[in-house]
Image: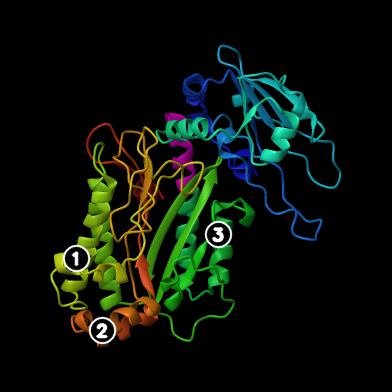
Amino acid sequence: MPFEETAAMPDDTAFAHYRPHLERVMAATAEALAAGGHEALVIHSGTPHLRFRDDYELPFRVNPLIAWWAPVATPHCALYFRPGERPSLWYWQPEDYWYLPPAAPDERWAGEFELSIVKGEDDWRRIAKDRPGLAVIAEDAGMAAANFPAAEVNPASLIGRLEQARTVKSDYEIACLAKATSRAVRGHRAAAAAFARGATEFEIHLDYLAAARSAEENLPYHNIVAQNEHAAVLHYQGLDRVPPTARHSFLIDAGAECAGYAADITRTYAAGGGLFAELIAALDDAQQRLAAYCEAGCDYREVHLTAHNAIAGILQEAGIVRLPAAAQVEQGISSVFFPHGLGHFLGLQVHDAAGLVAPDGTPRPRPAGHPYLRLTRDLEAGNVLTVEPGLYFIPQLLAGLRADRDKAGHVDWALVERLIPCGGIRIEDNVVIQPAGPPHNLTRDAFAAA
């Protein structure tokens, strides 16, 4: 199997943009260091964690701030950067017969660094002299402080500036995100086919992994593979091994990675025609309109509130709620059917950094009554984000609405009871904000290409 498939590495098209990306990262880091009065930076990739009272390691997740520099995915690595100097990378590649050692660094990026292959877990600690002005970013702050006692460990202002810089993606990053999207779309198509032939949730999940060519521990997040009422559990984590007695619906929220960059895609399917299928079509149309609203300069909070009005309009049109859309939103009824945020930044983290602060680092509050929105910024060119409206029939939330005498009378409860077995609908695309006009929809493009 080709290297890029087993390691989810970028292709030559992406690597053609790598050097400009690295130059951009170095410039942003130099600026952030100067602003905080730091002279140099060490970033540690991380250390594996053992299960409690066990000698078995949990799946390793690399520090995203080192993956921003290079597609490093292994522990015990470290990067050293002093502005004006070539960056150094200590790359951990032990001699081991218990586990397969990490693959050699890819020459398409490794040549940009003063590269040292290290065999021991502690060898990276020779990376820099402990001198004033050094900052260290590491998951294990105690370990970093012990080895660099004169350094400032995990300075919040420095990390905040670096995370701000990460909100605007380079061409290299967008190419990685596009590749991750293509991998995820292969999985989504296989999952839809498995549902159509009557597979269980567990079988659908396995088909997804095979088509996306991903091991479970390499997924950017736990796949949500939900049939029927399970689709009403927003982060459903089960994988039923037996088929449901009756098949009504299928929701899959699943992604893939490329060089640490994540795709995050959701699709919903009906087992047959009827009202639920019509609701899926209506939400899909609304989702595409909402995605098109995401232009440079727009306030994502306003797009989120527009989504509530769109979903309320669907509820009114279907006869589920007998109130105008604006009244549903004002009274909080739409939040019963759409209880989460419209979307979030996407990148080296599925819920990528700096979504709730302004560019100067000050908090950017959520709209009143919408506590779960993960992105509150004015959008700018190069932002990558998700747009994922939902329409759910969640028994716990519906029970509260039904108990509210002032609001319950506006709901057709017979229709709601018919729809509860279907669980809910979510449709999610990943989009890139353009300098002008509507965004580039990576997800729709990947489905069209497939």
Kind of residue sitting beneath label 2: Leu
Q: Quadrant of residue 152?
A: top right
Query: Viewer-nearest of labels 3 and 1?
Result: 1
Instruction: Name the residue that disc number 1 marks.
Output: 330
Q: What residue appears at the point 56 percent right and 76 percent down from the top-left corner?
A: 240
Query: Viewer-nearest of labels 2 and 1?
Result: 1
Q: Where is residue 337 in the image (x, y as percent from the top left)?
A: 30, 70
Q: Label 1's element?
A: helix
C-alpha gap between disc 3 and disc 1: 34 Å
Query: What mark, if any, has residue 415 been given in the picture?
Result: 2
Q: Quick check: 190 left or right of 399? A: right
Nearest the camera: 200 or 64? 64
C-alpha gap between disc 3 and disc 2: 32 Å
Q: What residue appears at the point 71 percent right and 28 percent down from the top-left corner?
A: 149
Instruction: Name the residue that disc number 3 marks.
Output: 222
Could you tell me if the residues under marks 3 and 2 are in contact, i.e. CB atoms within 8 Å? no
Q: Where is residue 74 in the image (x, y as percent from the top left)?
A: 68, 39
Nearest the camera: 9 or 157? 157
Kind of residue sitting beneath label 1: Glu
Q: Quick check: 300 left or right of 326? A: right
Q: Give the range drawn in magenta.
A: 170-182
Location of the N terminus by quadrant is top right
Whether residue 74 can be seen here = no
Kind of residue sitting beneath label 3: His
Lower sequence index among marks 3 and 1: 3
Lower sequence index among marks 3 and 2: 3
